[in-house]
Image (tube, rainbow, N blue to C red):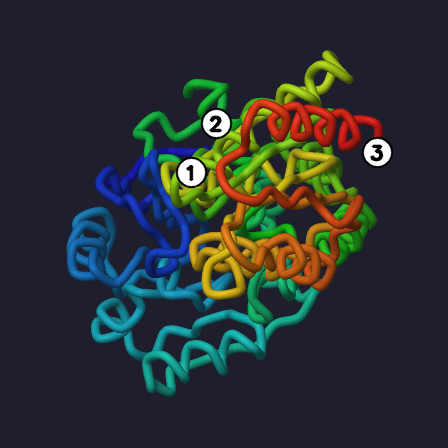
């Protein structure tokens, strides 16, 4: 269980190779995940976070083989969400009086979930805890990154930032450190994590990054709660976050649609052709929502400067798959992005109107009224779709 990170600091977490869905079924974890907990053994012994509740008994049993549980002087709960705190009930049965250091909001979260009045010690940004041998823990509140109770913990001397959810990824690996894993997979999971979880809080994150920098703390390691530990050039992920938090976009236009009888699919393909014809330099990606991972698509939306959403008209509105996806886009509060709509219809043709309204509410700048096509597009209507794509490229 125990893997050394640096000096007297070890990883004591859990690798979950089988995890495929997270936050209920809201987030796809195609590479599994890890639940990272950490043990500091200076003059004082400190446990930072635990693992998800299904692995609680396993976690406590394994931890008890590494150390006497009674030797734990403090527990730090950086975040109350169950994937981090889920083993606390099992652990605290064994050490009920050990103090738990956390934010005021984390007390509410932990009490609300586990209904236990443990020995909570509330901390704020800048508060310190002496762990001996000239080292201290410094606490940094990370409110709304991504819960109101979140915080990070910094260990002086070893210069380790235990960042909790910030800078993490859902990525199962036994290799522990960032320089030991596939860099393409790592980057893909890191940006997916940011796009799907942290995008709504980008404005808060920008301020928090400035606040962390202002503390003037040397950071040699960033020990996250999910995925790899950033040991090799750890500030590279901080620099990425600063970039992603700045209303991020690449030179990409993404076309996302669902279809009933392939008419809207045909429009999507011809629109993409028109975009590419007008601007060969722009990257154009086309996705059938029904055959795609919606969290991967959210990552593509995050990277895009313009997004096209297509749905046929059904029941005077749009397909429920597209409705759910646009709702997800709205929740994530994307900034500085344009959008356009398209869709086939047989009789009434409201889908583009509905989509334009919803996308405007979601914060996108809609380019025009969209492309409506009655029935299955013939050769002339396909040419119109190509022309529509050229308009989108110019916009």
Task: Look at the picture and state if 88 lies above or below 121.
Answer: above
Horizontal side of 184 relative to 14 (left or right) equals right
Query: Which x, y percent locates residue 268?
Result: 56, 32
Labels 1, 2: front one = 2
Return the mark for residue 186. Answer: 2
Gap in angstroms between the C-alphas marked 1 and 2: 9 Å
Residue at the image position 27 percent from the left and 73 percent from the top: 89
SS class of the residue under badge 2?
helix
Q: Is residue 314 visible?
A: yes
Tell me: residue 183, above or below residue 168: above
Q: Quadrant of residue 96?
A: bottom left
Cβ atoms under marks 1 and 2 closer than 8 Å: yes
- Residue at left offset 66%, top offset 39%: 307
Q: CA distance from mark 3 to mark 1?
A: 39 Å
Query: Which of marks 2 and 1 precedes in the sequence?
Result: 2
Label 1 secondary element: loop
Residue 318 picture location, percent across and down: 51, 58
Q: Residue 227, labelled with which disc?
A: 1
């Amino acid at each position: 269980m125990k893997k050394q990170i640096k000096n007297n600091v070890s990883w004591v977490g859990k690798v979950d190779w089988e995890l495929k869905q997270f936050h209920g079924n809201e987030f796809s974890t195609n590479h599994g995940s890890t639940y990272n907990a950490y043990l500091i053994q200076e003059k004082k012994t400190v446990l930072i976070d635990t693992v998800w509740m299904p692995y609680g008994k396993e976690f406590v049993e394994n931890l008890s083989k590494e150390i006497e549980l009674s030797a734990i002087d403090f527990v730090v709960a950086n975040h109350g969400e169950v994937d981090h705190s889920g083993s606390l009930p099992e652990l605290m049965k064994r050490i009920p009086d050990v103090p738990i250091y956390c934010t005021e909001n984390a007390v509410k979260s932990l009490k609300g979930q586990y209904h236990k009045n443990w020995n909570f010690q509330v901390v704020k940004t800048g508060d310190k805890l002496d762990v001996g041998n000239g080292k201290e823990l410094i606490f940094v509140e990370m409110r709304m990154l991504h819960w109101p109770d979140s915080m990070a913990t910094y260990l002086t001397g070893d210069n380790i930032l235990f960042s909790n959810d910030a800078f993490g990824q859902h990525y199962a690996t036994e290799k522990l450190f960032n320089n030991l894993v596939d860099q393409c997979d790592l980057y893909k999971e890191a940006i997916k994590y940011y796009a799907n979880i942290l995008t709504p809080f980008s404005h808060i994150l920008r301020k928090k990054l400035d606040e962390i920098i202002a503390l003037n703390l040397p950071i040699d390691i960033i020990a996250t709660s999910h995925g790899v530990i950033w040991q090799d050039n750890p500030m590279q992920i901080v620099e990425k976050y600063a970039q992603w938090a700045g209303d991020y976009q690449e030179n990409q236009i993404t076309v996302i649609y669902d279809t009933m009888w392939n008419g809207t699919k045909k429009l999507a393909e011809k629109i993409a052709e028109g975009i590419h014809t007008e601007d060969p330099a722009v990257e154009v990606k086309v996705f059938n929502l029904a055959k795609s991972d919606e969290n991967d698509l959210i990552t593509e939306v995050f990277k895009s400067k313009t997004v096209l959403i297509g749905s046929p008209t059904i029941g005077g509105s749009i397909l429920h798959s597209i409705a759910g996806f646009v709702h997800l886009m709205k929740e994530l509060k994307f900034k500085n992005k344009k959008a356009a709509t398209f869709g086939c219809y047989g009789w009434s043709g409201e889908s583009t109107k509905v989509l334009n309204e919803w996308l405007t509410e979601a914060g996108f700048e809609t380019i025009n009224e969209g492309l409506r096509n009655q029935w299955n597009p013939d050769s002339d209507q396909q040419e119109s779709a190509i022309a529509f794509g050229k308009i989108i490229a110019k916009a």
